[in-house]
Amino acid sequence: MSPGVAFFVPAMLLLLATLIKVWALLKNWQDTLLRAVCAVLFIAALVFATAAPPMLALINEVTGVPNIAAPLVYCVLTAFDGSSIVLLIYWRGGEDEARTRRATRLTVTAYGTVMAALCVLFALGEAPVERLRDLDTYYANTPYIREMIVLYLAAHSVAALTMLVLCWRWSRKVPGTLRAGLLTMAVGNALTFGYDVMKYTAIAARWLGGDLDWLSTQVAFVMASVSALVVAAGFLIPPLGQSATSRLRALRRYRGLRPLWLEVRAAIPGTSQAPLRWWAPMELRLMQLERDIHDALLRIGPCCDRELGTLVYGQAMDRYADRKRALIVADAAVIAAAVVAKTGPQAGSGLEASARWSISSTQDTADLVSMSLALAHPLVQATRPRTEKAP
């Protein structure tokens, strides 16, 4: 694999992660946190794009200054470090907004100062020989360039350890996909610190007259690539996980309500929209299903028989001694009978108000699903032959 490809592949993957978040951002442009996530992922992609040897050579050639791409890459990396900490601060939030603002200002000021210092140190030093892959070790003993290298690594290490500690502490207080995302980011930042350790070791070897450059040019690069992708995955896991969980919950609810929809389908107003196709978003299909069910229940309301409801309720109470469960079974039986009374061959105008049963299982979403499933209950099935044969 060529050096350029080795850098551009992580850059493209991070850019893909950015585009995924941008797609979500287009639907909710006012979400400042989402905008911050997009910015962090884009900067991470920019780090790898600008650090690729072909890009370094291009920047040096265009500017005419040997190795000027180095402080540029270090500044972009420092910006990523600072923005990651700021993002985590705001992501975590908290009741003390003043404290959050102070922490943000401190982070921005600190990393902004580091970026300025990197540029000043490069200007003060001398790096005439272009080094596209081993600048850190080649100039490890050069005044000012040496300090520039150590400074960017120190800032990078502080950010990695800060993110590691914050992610670990926060993960112990939250559940689900957010916890998984934070733990993933903690692993990614541990790898990031490992990258710094490899760099420190290679530079220290140069100071001592040794040569461990391969730790910097090979091992550290692999760790940086993996850590960047792991951290990006950590940022993506919570929203993608929540979205998947939401869709799975909608699918389960849709399937749970399907028997009820089939039961009342004959009573659904003819003006209702035709059912959406299977490829339509599950949330929209569920919304349409629930709307059709409620419209049908309104139409069959006058045909809900209090006498039947009371009978089935009593039988269910004898069986379960659970008022809520008994009401759900009674509601299911009454609905099944009311559909026949409303749409069957002997359809009438309805019962007197005093003879009507009031359906109560529609007030809670979970109860509505339970009532749908209760249509298959033996007590409900036992009422069907008598209901369907009633004159």
Image: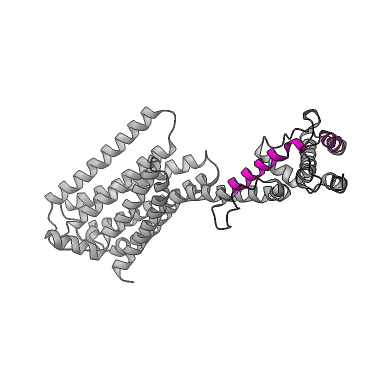
Apparent side of residue 224 relative to residue 72 in the rendered image (left or right): right
> What residue is drawn where x is 66% and y is 36%?
364
Q: Is residue 334 above or below residue 12?
A: above
Seen in the picture, residue 113 relative to 125 is either above or below; the reply is above
Residue 174 as seen in the image, left or right of residue 115? right
Residue situated in front as seen by the camera: 70 or 291: 291
Residue in the foreground of this view, choosing between 243 and 177: 243
The answer, for residue 166, to whether it is visible in the render is yes
Residue at 33 percent of width and 36 percent of height: 104
Q: Nearer the viewer, residue 251 or 192?
A: 251
Residue 138 sits in quarter: bottom left
Residue 201 in view, yes or no: no
Q: Is residue 171 left or right of residue 41?
A: right
* Residue 387, image x, y percentages: 85, 45
Q: Position of residue 189 (x, y in %)?
A: 40, 50
Based on the picture, tell me whether residue 311 belongs to the magenta stretch.
yes
The rendered magenta stretch, by its main secondary structure, is classed as helix
Q: Any magenta on residue 143?
A: no
Q: Which residues are magenta?
A: 286-313
